[in-house]
Image: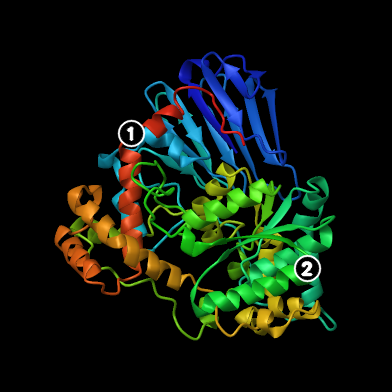
Amino acid sequence: MLRFHIHADDVSGSWSWTDPSWMSGSSWITPLPFPILTATATREAGATIVHVREDRPGGDSTQIQLGSDGSIALRAGTGGTAPLYLAADGTGLVGSWDPVDLEPFAHADALSPMVVARLLTRRHRYSSDTLFATITRLTAGTVINWTRAAGLSVRYPYPVAHVVRPRRLRPGGDPVSHLGALLDRPIAETCERHRGAVAVEVSGGLDSANVALTVALRADGRVLSGGLIVGGRTGRARIERRREIVEHLGLRDVTIAAADHLPLAPGGPRSPQRPHYADGDVYQEAFDMLRTAMYAAGGRVVFTGFGGDEIMGLAPDERQSDTRPPHTPSWLDSRARDALTDVDAACSPVTAVALPTLVVFAARNPTYLRAGLWPIAPFASPELSRFGRSLPIEWRTGKDLLRQRLARVGLRRTVTHPMRPESFAATMRVALGRHAPALLADMLDDSVLIASGFVRRAAVETLHRQANDGHALPPLLYDMLALDIGVRSMTTMSPVAAEGNLLCAPSMPNR
């Protein structure tokens, strides 16, 4: 929600507004310039408190308290929408919603083995730890304190108590109507206040379709929708589902073909020449184009279906089979293998928003913000979480509740009960087949992961031969390539990064 560079000597000084920042000496705090955000600065008991919050029911917030004793306290709201990334330099504290702004603090020798192991094996965790030990994330509900003498200290919130077991429905209870009412709460006021600027992502799946239904009912005029077009048999079915949803709800649709913007494509947003944080959106290349198109079409606030899986999820004792992590890839070197024992260490406790949803927010939301779009995930509201966890298992199995709500408004079974689940697998296979040979060759020439003992060079040589021979490549290869590229992009200062260096000036990217 903001960026800042605060020198220790300026903390207790007089803070005043000089558009677009609060200033004290050479220090500055700049809130994001989104209409949905409200930013204030007040004085309380000798401290200056800067507070940025979403202006909607249940909205997220970020607060900075600048103490008269030179201390800084940062408090995150419970939504996790735009987590701050923090680093302490020799004179004070630097922070930003965009981890790329912290590039000057990203050093190859500061890689966290625990986080590297998580990213190489898809064992993602929500934590204040980031890829670099020199950079800390302010997670949902967390307080981080800083003093010149002690540096940074993290205090996680107490675990949030969730519904432990499902309940019985009252006679005559209608979960479908109640779902609609709960979805309406985080949507209605935003649609009213941002009339004409509301967009919704429509993938063709149940989660986003239910969100789009509520947005279409509430928004005045045709709502902007956007989605990716993917290839293969599942892609054709997805196109048909999206078409029916768009036409049924009267949406104003924009689409982008994923095949035209493949993951790992050279010259795209994920290349060694463009600094980027490795733990980002898997299909960022195509989604960046979609977000750009949605902004150009007038979208400023975008509703997403994130969180739907979590509120409809089954507890471990309700599942017929265990959910196991992906296998350990053969290319892990000793340093990454040793770190696998720590992947669950120092994680955030249970929060009001489901932890897997917060992982998605941290990975994907910065890309919305760069595009000028403010993301809102109605399914992430604590009320919907409690409701979903309370439902009898038959309503959650296969997301039956979501299917029934769509059926009630007349959407056909091709939407409510698709024959094939959504999948980007075909897109990823094409991307790896096309781009992996050159990227693996690059790794053999220059790889921080190989040099640091996280990935075995011999395994990369084998993968390179297989890629050149046209063999099918394992999906986890994407994770290794994306991580290697991301680390190289952040640990090598480039002209692009130098122009936007957070330490240089209180500039703010404005669309």
Helix, strand or loop at label 1? It is loop
Q: Which mark is residue 466?
A: none
Q: Residue at x 45, y 51 (%)?
A: 127
Q: Residue at x 60, y 33 (%)?
A: 510
Give the colour scheme of this rendering. rainbow
- Residue 1 vs 377, above or below: the answer is above
**In x, y percent, where is residue 167?**
70, 78
Closer to us: 200 or 366: 200
Give the position of the N terminus as an image quadrant.
top right
Label 2 SS: helix
Q: Amino acid at mark 1?
A: Met
Q: Residue furthest front?
A: 260
**Which is nearer the eye, 204 or 93?**
204
Instruction: Say if residue 66 shows up in the picture.
Output: no
Tally of numbered discs: 2
Q: Nearer the viewer, mark 1 or mark 2?
A: 2
On the rendered structure, is 174 left or right of 291? right
Asked if the residues shown at circle 1 and circle 2 are in contact, with their CB atoms under 8 angstroms apart, the answer is no
Q: What amino acid type should be assigned to the residue bearing mark 2?
A: Leu
Badge 2: how crowded within 10 Å, few (<14), some, or many (20+)? some
The picture places residue 143, in percent across and down from the top left corner, at: 54, 40
Mark positioned earlier in the residue sequence (1 or 2): 2
**Which residue does the numbered mark 2 point to in the structure image?**
249
* Residue 180 in view of the camera: yes
Q: Which mark is residue 493?
A: 1
